[in-house]
Amino acid sequence: MTALSIGDVIAERTFVLTRDSLVRYAGASGDFNPIHYRDDIARSVGLSGVLAHGMLTMGFAVQPVVDWIGDPARVLDYQVRFTRPVPVDATDGATVAVVAKIGALESGEVGPDQDGPDQDGPDQVGPDIARIDLTVTFDGSTVLGKAQVRVRLG
Amino acid sequence: MPVNPALQGRVFPPTAPYLVAREKIREFARAVFSDSPLSLDVSAARAAGYDDLVASPTFAVVVQESTLAQLLAEPDAGIDFSRVVHGDQRFSFSRPIVAGDELVATLTIAGVKSLGGHSMVTAQSDITDASGEHVVTATSTLVVRGDE
């Protein structure tokens, strides 16, 4: 983790969603909005068909970063904007690509060590926090905006 | 009916405690395509210094959900669920959620804005553990579409 530069791609992964994925996420999350499993209801509110839960996309898009950093506890902050829906075809599903890049590196003292600030031991220094920017695309278009994960490196 | 601007600043009663179960962490991890051993394998989580399985980053939505239900059920809120679109979402952590945690969420309506006939409601759910310590804040912006 020492030679990170802004713009480095730290992880890439492709996810194949099927209707089964949506049913599984509905059960796991408790979000049973029927637009995520019933085409007739999705169409009745003007959609082309069943869509993935935005929170499902948010949930898997961070996984390449978790794998890279090795520990979900190093994720300090994670935000996304839902900019475009992901329709999931009953037969073909939907393939969503995630590319994770270093967006910013924050160095220097981020907090005191256990002995308190500026006491005997050194305070935390070095490249402490990285902002990882996620590019999440379906069918050639991005589906999340301002998708950023702040992670603790040290 | 527009969203009631008087919602701004309203703080809701804390939710009933949510006990985070090990199998729920596994179920959620599988649903978001997680391969993280810390979310799936208790011995790996313990070797990394945790008491039990560590939840995936977006697991807090399971706890947040009951606060959004409070908001939608508020009689004077003026929020028609069928017109709600999820605009954005954020999780800010003090520490990860671990199996065995008993979590309580307190909803604050941080903002109500009107924008071109739509309303934007910022719902901030502060999630704390059994000792009252902050674990994570989950913030959603809900876009409530106006009459078309």
Image (cartoon, grey):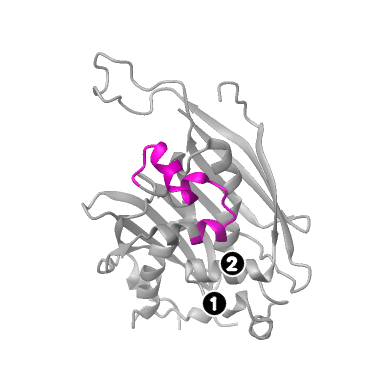
Q: Which residue is mark 2?
A: A53
The residue shown at (33%, 45%) is B51
Q: Which residues are magenta?
A: B27-51
Report the chain holding disc 1: A
| Viewer-proximal residue among A118 and B22 | B22
**Image location (x, y in percent) of residue B21:** 37, 60
Mark 1 and mark 2 lie on one chain; the one further toward the N terminus is 1
**Residue A5: which quarter of the image?**
top right
Q: Amino acid at mark 1?
A: Asn
Q: Which mark is residue A59?
A: none
**Element at label 1:** loop
The residue shown at (49%, 40%) is A150
Classify B134 as above or below A57.
above
| Viewer-proximal residue among A95 and B105 | A95
**Residue B127: which quarter of the image?**
bottom left
Q: Which mark is residue A33?
A: 1
Q: Is residue B5 left or right of residue A2?
A: left
Classify A84 as above or below B148.
above
Disc 1 vs disc 2: Cβ atoms closer than 8 Å?
Answer: yes
**Image location (x, y in percent) of residue A3:** 60, 21
Q: Quadrant of the N terminus of chain A?
A: top right
**Image location (x, y in percent) of residue A93:** 74, 67
| Viewer-proximal residue among A14 and B94 | A14
Q: Is residue B114 left or right of residue A7?
A: left
Q: Give the total of numbered labels.
A: 2
The residue shown at (57%, 61%) is A56
Give the main secondary structure of the magenta stretch: helix
Residue B76 seen? yes
Q: Amino acid at mark 2?
A: His
Q: Is residue A151 magenta?
A: no
